[in-house]
Amino acid sequence: MNLYKMHNEPTQLLQYDNVKKVAEQLDIDVFWKEVKRMPNMVGTGTDVIAKDSNLSFMYAMYGVRGRFEEGETAIAKSPSNSFEYAKEILKGRFPEGEDAIGSEGLYALQYARDTMKGRFPKGEDEIARAPIRAFLYARIMKDRFPKGEETLKKHNEFWGKYVKMLATNGIEI
């Protein structure tokens, strides 16, 4: 529920001026999903946005439609926002967010595939924890993935696909 839109006198609500400035900069409805978190923030305009990972990513995506350097430290705290920021905004690597991306296996795999176009060492430990991710990662690299082999060996289906994929690429185990 957006009290700022529903209230008869929204100017009397806490942080109204800050919320209004930020919303005007973004000019999108999606922003209002995050407004409920605003009363704890102090400041105006982009300095408020830059304190929050979700707001910073949304501002980059829908507000400035490009890089938002002031918010990159906040964005870098979230695996999903870091991955999407790299893919959609930077169209390349986001070194500041790679630790966060590497902490979540799915985002690490997607980052390896979509951004790195190959190995992503910071994400390998998490990727190796799930057999399908370990197999897909090896396929992206077109090479062995030793960190994932123990996980793969526990799942016959993926181990078989892994061995076959390596053989197709002329690689022996």
Image (cartoon, helix red, strand yellow):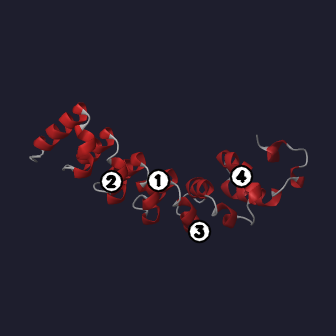
Q: Amino acid at mark 3?
A: Glu
Q: Which residue is mark 3?
A: 70
Q: Which mark is nearer the camera, 2 or 1?
A: 2
Q: Are marks 2 and 3 in contact (CB under 8 Å)?
A: no
Q: Tell me the quarter of the image containing the N terminus.
A: top right
Q: Which residue is mark 2?
A: 124
Q: Closer to the N terminus: mark 4 or mark 3?
A: 4
Q: Which mark is nearer the camera, 2 or 4?
A: 2
Q: Residues within 10 Å of mark 3 (few under 14, many from 20)?
A: some
Q: Amino acid at mark 1?
A: Glu
Residue extending furthest toward the top: 157
Q: Closer to the N terminus: mark 2 or mark 3?
A: 3
Q: Which mark is residue 14?
A: none
Q: Closer to the N terminus: mark 2 or mark 4?
A: 4
Q: Residues within 10 Å of mark 1 (few under 14, many from 20)?
A: some
On the image, the x and y values in percent for residue 169 come to: 12, 45
Q: Amino acid at mark 4?
A: Arg
Distance from disc 2 to disc 1, alpha carbons, whole Å, reads 23 Å
On the image, the x and y values in percent for residue 48 come to: 69, 63
Q: Residues within 10 Å of mark 2 (few under 14, many from 20)?
A: many
Distance from disc 3 to disc 1, alpha carbons, whole Å, reads 17 Å
Tell me which residue sits at (66%, 55%) in the image.
26
Q: Which residue is mark 4?
A: 37
Question: Is residue 94 in sight in this rendering?
Answer: yes
Distance from disc 4 to disc 1, alpha carbons, whole Å, reads 25 Å
Distance from disc 2 to disc 4, alpha carbons, whole Å, reads 34 Å
Q: Secondary structure at mark 2?
A: helix
Q: Secondary structure at mark 4?
A: helix
Q: Which residue is mark 1?
A: 88
Q: Closer to the N terminus: mark 3 or mark 1?
A: 3
